[in-house]
Image: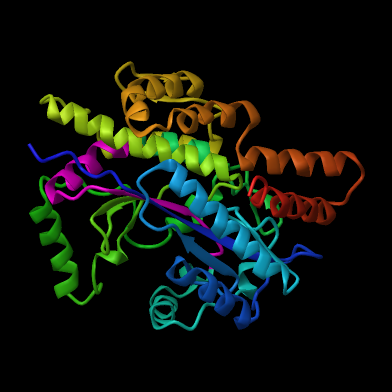
Amino acid sequence: MPAEPSFTLGIEEEYHLVERASGVLAFEPPPAMLAAAQQRLGERAMPEFLKSQIEVATRKCSTLAEARRELVELRRTVAELAGEHGLAPIAASTHPFADWGDVKHSERERYVQLARDLQGVARRLVICGMHVHVGIEDEDLRIDLMSQVAYFLPHLLALSTSSPFWRGEDTGLKSYRISVFQELPRTGLPEVFASWSEYQRHVQILVQAGLIEDASKFWWDIRPSARFPTLEMRVTDVCTRLDDGLAIAALYRCLLRMLWRLRRSNQRWRIYARMLVYENRWRAQRYGHDEGMVDFGKGVVVPYRDLLEEIIELVAPDAAHFGCEAEVAHARAILDRGTSADRQRQVYREAIASGAKPAEALKRVVAWLIEETVAGV
């Protein structure tokens, strides 16, 4: 049995940059802004695929309190530097009314190649996400836990939804980002691999064929990081509220430790067919937490709140171990208040009810996102 993993934590967030006065996406923000961010934050700030985006990443953290301090600094610094140019970051996975046909990609070689290879699919990637890395040093354990924790990814997605609008229309989905992102190759749920060596063999087939350079071109909902000894969760939308993102990171980390505890006791979580997990993934994408998910053991749809309570109970020893009971419990507050997607729709409806035209109502949504992104930081 491998030793207990470090379960270190790292969080990456992507933000859209918008013009503060108009709410319009900043299609070509001044290079000086990104340069200043990198000067202040070093490798913790970096360009994203589109010029209208910026990505931030925490250092490797041992506690949720460390991760919170890092994200507070990152959001605050980006907002301050963007404000010097009349811009603001919004932590939402889609911009409510931007037209993807107007965006421009960054000039980094990786992104130039990506745009060339993926063509129209890449041009639609006006989306932002949140990625959570958890340190699991043993490679075979990393693969085993990836297969097991995939069951819970729809539950995490449902807590994070922040992309109901696309090109000025309500899509009817809570996470339209998923629809856009899954047009890329090598996305969605990962395959089930028996070992690290089996995973590596499959990677090498694509590398040797010249289709990919390395495993960083796997954009699954969860993957072994190509850069770090971590298991990287990628399914979630970026959370507008900082506390919401931390709650999801805490839950993900605790779920991994819960599965490790089972393995230590010669038990494991049942690995369900991907076709079944995809059903819950769709329900999270479409309804968020509103319409429940399937309990495959019972074969019935169960209210999401009931499922969340079961998860919180499952990971209670792990939340106590990490000292993150408050962050895990915050997941209940997300249900009570609603996710960013719920709140964006509420802002839009209230604006329409007050007599605003749709275009003005969408601008009010962006104004709300600007304020909520830095609330509490």
User: What residue is shown at x 56% (from left), y 64% (from top)?
Assistant: 126
Horizontal and vertical percent position of residue 91: 60, 54
Q: Is residue 132 magenta?
A: yes
Q: Residue at x 55, y 34 (%)?
A: 287
Residue 297: % across, % down: 29, 19
Instruction: Where is residue 214? Give x, y as percent.
Output: 23, 70
In the foreground, 222 or 40: 40
On screen, residue 323 versus residue 48, left or right, reads left
| Quadrant of the snapshot with the N terminus | top left
- The boundaries of the magenta stretch are 124-151
Residue at horizontal 34 percent and vertical 19 percent from the top? 299
In front: 89, or 201?
89
Q: Quadrant of residue 12?
A: bottom left
Q: Quadrant of residue 100?
A: bottom right
Magenta stretch holds residue 335? no
Seen in the image, is 333 located left or right of residue 157? right
Q: How many marks?
A: 0
Say above or below: 31 vs 41: below
Residue 275 visible in this rendered orientation of the protein: no
